[in-house]
Each structure stands twice: as C-alpha cells, then as structure tokens.
Amino acid sequence: MRRLHFIPLLVLAACGGDTKCDPVAQTGCDNGMVCEEVTGTDPACFAAVEIDGKVIDLATQQGIAGARIVAVDVNGTAQSNIVISGQDGTYKLPIPTQRNPDGTTVALATVLLRADAVGYGPFPGTIRQPLPIDLGMATMTGSGYIFKSAQTDIGLLKLDAGGAGTIHGAVDLPDDHAGVLVVAESAGKGYSAIAARDGAYAILNLPAGHYAVTAYALGHVYTAAETDVATSDVTLDLHLDATAATSVSGTVQIVNGGGASATSIVLFVESTYDPVTGRGVQPSNFRAPGPGVAPNVTGAFTIDGIPPGHYVAVGAFENDGLVRDPDTCISGTADVHITVVAGQPLAISQGFKITGALAVMSPGATTAEMVTGNPTFTWADDSGEDQYLVEVFDPFGQRIWMKTTPGVSGGMPSLAYDGNPALQPGAYYQFRVTSSKNQCQLARTEDLRGVFYLP
C-alpha cells in the first residue's frame, strides 16, 4: 500500500436519529461511522481512523482466532476499545481521534498495539516491545483512514507450558473513564488485561493458584476480590467502592539533559514490573502531568487520583529528549517502589534521575523513514563514553541484530547494518543505541525514535 501523510479533512456524518452519539459506548452512529469527541461542542459521527492487521503464530505464520487487540500509548494507557480477531487472525481497530467542529483531526496519535490470546504469551512482553505506529501515515480510503502494513501484524509466541486458567467478568465503568486495567496477582506476579468499553475483561493463561484481583482507574477505587484458579474459567465481577483515591508526589533530578528540561512520570503496577527492562503495566493515565498534557515535569510532580496499591514510579517513555538514567553505577537510579494507602497522600522520599537521550540522526529521527538497501545508523555523540551498543528490532519486537562500536570524540558516531539477516521489503524496524563507559550504561536513544522501513 502506498504511504501518504494523513489528510485531515473528514466529512461529518449525522448521528442516527436525534440522539447524541456516545463516544465511550460507541452508540448513535449509522453507516459504519464512529462517534468522536469534538472540541467545544457535542460528540458527532465521522469516518473512522482505523488500524487493520493480523495476529499470527510466529512459528507457523498462521492466523490466531479470538485474540484480543487494543491500542495503547507508549506508557501502556489504553487508546481504543478492544476488538477480537477473526478466524483468520485479521482485525480492524478504530482509534478514537478528537475532532474540530469542521471534522478535521485535532491531533494524530502515535500508538502501540497490545494483543492477548489463549495459549500464547502476551504482546508486548517485557523483552519484546512493539514499534510505534504513526497514524499520520494512514491512507485515505472510501470508508475512512486506514493504517495497514507489516507493522500492524502482531506475532505471538506459543506457550510451551503454563496456565490454562482464565479469570473473566465485568468491571463497573465510571462515567469518566474507559480502558480500566485489571490485574490478577499470585505469588508476587501480576497478570493483566484491559477491560473493553462495556466493562468486559479476560485475563488469560493463568497458572493454577490463588489470586487477588484488582481493577485500576484514575480517580476511582475498586473493591479487591480473591479467587482460586485451576484449569478452567472463573467468573469474577469487580465493583467500585466509596473509598477516595489519593495523591502521589515526588521529585526527579534531570542530569545532563542536553537542552531538554521537562519530562513525565508514570506509575506501573508493581507485580507486573520487570526490573531488567524497567517496564511494567501502567493503569490508564497514572501519569504526571495529567492526561493530554505535554511533558512538563522539571523537578517536583504530583499525580492525583491514585487508588491504594503497590506501584513503581519511573520516567515515562514518550519523546521529550530525556530518558530514565540507566547508570546503575551511580546513586539515584534505583527503582522507586511505593505503597499507596487509602486516604493518605504519599510523598515519595526517594528521588530518581532522568538524563538526556541520545538523539537519533538517521534513519527515523522524527518519524518512520524509508531506506533503500542496508542503512547506516547515526546518532549524536555522548560525552565520556567508551562504547556504544547498537540493536535492531523487527516488527514483532524481536532483536535480530546487535553490535558494539567504540566511542568517538567530537564526531558523529555511526554503524552500518551488515545485511545479516536481510531486511525484508515492506517491513518496519527500529534501531536503538546505548552508550556506556567501563561497562556502566550512560544514556540511550528514545523509545519512539529510530524507526525505518523498506519500500
């Protein structure tokens, strides 16, 4: 499919009858239209912005039926409803997009894809991370704007062993919230699912055991529940209670920002957190600054509306010119684990450091970039490094190539891809760079940079 930059002109469509459409429940629109929020006025119906793709078994390349797909932002916050893949593994996923009164889009998101299926490990995992999808590259069709490429095919790895149990049910949905996160915990490990816009959720592939199950929504508290899982389905509904959510505050130190001075902070549910990769599962909008606000944290921060629970606070993964400081050889870079108690605002006593990212020069400095042949990767020089690690990841989040190259002084570091394995036409890839000195990591490129593809 030929790639075009997103053309923001959309034709406003009438809602069905005289009833206002509902953008959360997705009711009130006719003829395949979707209900979208409109700046300064009531929601209305428009042609969809949609991602089309396929969920496949990575080993057999066959489609996986019944997979649950949702779009999330770079920090894991749900950006869409959940759709279910068809018998051949294909899916169509509308992405809610705020509009102006004339129907043009207010902003076009960069999203990632999450998928879960019975008998398969979830994607993304802590190691396998998805490539960002820039919806500004969507293509106009007769029915709306479609993004479809090798990047929208989601590869899942079949579980060799593990649980056959499932916890499913419904969560109460607050009027102001979609994308409620549900986490089931057993023996310190958390398994998660995002609830659909009707509140339905399903946590798959659970080992037998006793589970504590909790739902998370900004500004709301749910009554936790417990259940035992063997090898079959367990039905468990989760309900809101009257307990008030509270606030979490703290301070970050930006060190060697390289001109960047503002970042954002997110909270991961502790039982889902992997200390090796520094990632976990984030409840929707557990972030400072608040939803929809560009990164503006320069030191002190506060996140309001946090329910009781155990969390890990980290620097967020969006493009702000900064990254979490990866240097474990200095103080202030350890994981920040916190416990939030109902009705008790929490001030984090432990600070943590953010540092300047290694700027990507080419390819993929700002958006996905087309390359021909084997690319040469270039990035901004760090100060004081003695080595760079360069990694390349395929569309399924699998590392396919890695090499080290010596540090440089005063020049532009670069490394050519050696062609092994061969890059495939039409496929998207990402390169990532980490600098180090004396085996202590100093900085790395940002999570959304360095994406490239072959025609």
Image (cartoon, rainbow, N blue to C red):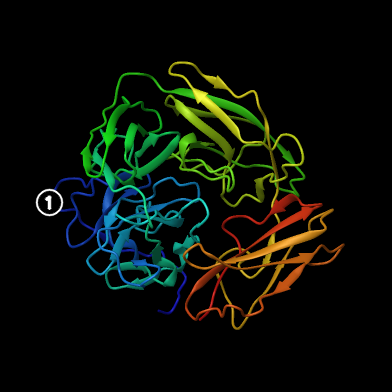
Q: Residue furthest left?
A: 17
Query: Which corner quadrant of the image does residue 84 belong to?
Result: bottom left
Residue 227 horizontal/vertical position (percent): 27, 31
- Disc 1 packing (10 Å; few <14; some 14–19; many ≥20): few
Q: Is residue 68 left or right of residue 30?
A: right
Local secondary structure at mark 1: loop
Front in this rendered view, residue 79 or 99: 79
Query: Which corner quadrant of the image does residue 157 belong to?
Result: bottom left
Q: Which residue is mark 1?
A: 17
Residue drawn at the location 79% of the way across and 56% of the way down: 382
Front in this rendered view, residue 429 or 105: 429
Where does the N terminus fall, quadrant-wise?
bottom left
Residue 151 horizontal/vertical position (percent): 44, 68
Marker count (numbered): 1
Q: Amino acid at mark 1?
A: Gly
Q: Residue furthest top?
A: 343
Residue drawn at the location 31% of the way across and 59% of the way down: 93
Residue drawn at the location 50% of the way across and 32% of the way down: 311
Q: Residue furthest right?
A: 409
Residue 37 horizontal/vertical position (percent): 33, 48
Residue 234 horizontal/vertical position (percent): 22, 39
Residue drawn at the location 29% of the way across and 64% of the way down: 64
Is residue 205 in view from this perspective?
yes
Is residue 201 in view from this perspective?
no
